[in-house]
Amino acid sequence: MTTVADLKGQTVAFAASGGLDSCTVTRWLTDHGVKVVAVTADIAQPDETDFGAIERRMRASGAADYVAVPLHDMIAESGVEVIQFQARYEGAYWNTTGIGRHVIVAGLVPELRKRGIGVLGHGATGRGNDQVRFQLCTNMLAPDVTVYAPWRDPAFLARFRGRTEMIDYCESHKLPITASKTAPYSTDANLLGLTHEAGKLEHLDCPPWFVTPGMGVLPTDAPEAPETVTVRFEEGRPVSLNGKPTTPFQAIQQANAIGGRNAVGIATHLVENRFVGIKSRGVYEAPGMELLGTAYAYLLQLVLDRRSRDLFDHLSGFVSKQIYQGYGFDLGTHMARQALAPINRLATGTIRLKLYKGRAEFDAAADVPHQIYSEANASMEAIGAFDHADSEGFLRVLQVSARALAAHGQVVAPAWAK
């Protein structure tokens, strides 16, 4: 475990958002003889667009230098991969913060290399998932870089028990923080979405609707008329929205606006299993991911046969956990990417959705060259190549095993069937 005593006289690149933790840790390290270079990942976080203001706060807190690293394309590409995998942790959370930590580390490591800095610091707490993500991602991409986590440093913990002590410390040093002791929850943000947790959300008797959406509106405030949106995918990538060509970044950015105003992907509530072994409650916003991800899910329904669907569902669940737990760069995830590649090559088509008060529903599909859905074969009318009489032989084969189960006492009907 690395402590502040070990770092005296060294330079630490601190992953700084410009918030309470960043200001507190920067000043505390500086007071202990550590040179801090504040490094902010520009991952298109909608709650903080003025990086000049972040720089002013960090320098006022004692940072010797500051740099913002532009990572718009990287966060967008990571979002596309999450959509391709349909990687929603425990079925609901689009892994926006989880994949965001992977992007931050991947984007900041080159900056550390350029500056010759061998220590990366972060403000993730000792009870959460982010500490694991920062640690494992750095260990995998730059095993020679030391990770410093103040929330696991006994000296830091002896000084700061939580948010209240940090605010008092910053105020006593006249640091330009914006946090308050009465904040009802904390928020983490990037292009892909917002995560809200802590504060009043820790109380299960408190409904989640008090959270003020940052990327859209609640369903009750959405328009009374539905809105349609058309998404075109080519080989697994969104290439146009409503007929207009887009880059991945533009697609997610525009989908955020369209989905958000219709309450799609807003205020998703989840009590989840953190990797560290405790339950946590969060409210998530990911309007663009929900819109694009839902459209992609409908495209996959047209393309995948039942055996490839089984494998895909396994890959989806596996990668969802991998990203959530900080293993997005390991061999298992790499193998999953290779297995997904053939599906991506077939995932071309145009999907139209109808958006209405938080719902994104299928409206139409067109130009899907690799779909195996056949209107003729699926029809209940007397058309197409599927002869209903052919099912007689199929059922004769299936009945052999069904009757064998009955003959040997292996059929156990539930109580409701008796």
Image (spheres, rainbow, N blue to C red):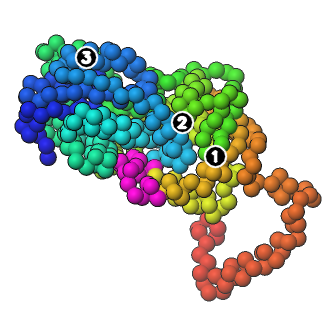
* Callout 2: SS: helix
Q: Position of residue 391 (x, y in %)?
A: 82, 71
Which label belongs to residue 57? 3
Q: Which residue is mark 2?
A: 289
Range of magenta residues: 320-335
Locate residue 187 relative to residue 57 in the image: left or right: right
* Residue 95 drawn at (x, y percent): 44, 41
User: Is 322 within the magenta?
Assistant: yes
Residue 260, relative to residue 306: is it above or below? above
Q: Are marks 2 and 3 in contact (CB under 8 Å)?
A: no
Q: Is 396 in the magenta?
A: no
Residue that numbered label 1 is attached to = 235
Q: Earlier in the sequence, mark 2 or mark 1?
A: 1
On screen, residue 24 versus residue 317, left or right, reads left
Residue for point 28% across, 32% down: 15
Corner quadrant of residue 56: top left
- With respect to residue 266, does 98 lie above or below? below
Depth order, front residue of 55/384: 55
The amino acid on which the numbered mark 1 sits, given as a three-letter code, is Glu
Mark 3 or 1: the one toward you: 1
Q: Residue at x 72, y 82 (%)?
A: 400
Label 1, residues with CA under 10 Å away: few <14, some 14-19, many ≥20: some
Foreground residue, 330 or 150? Answer: 330
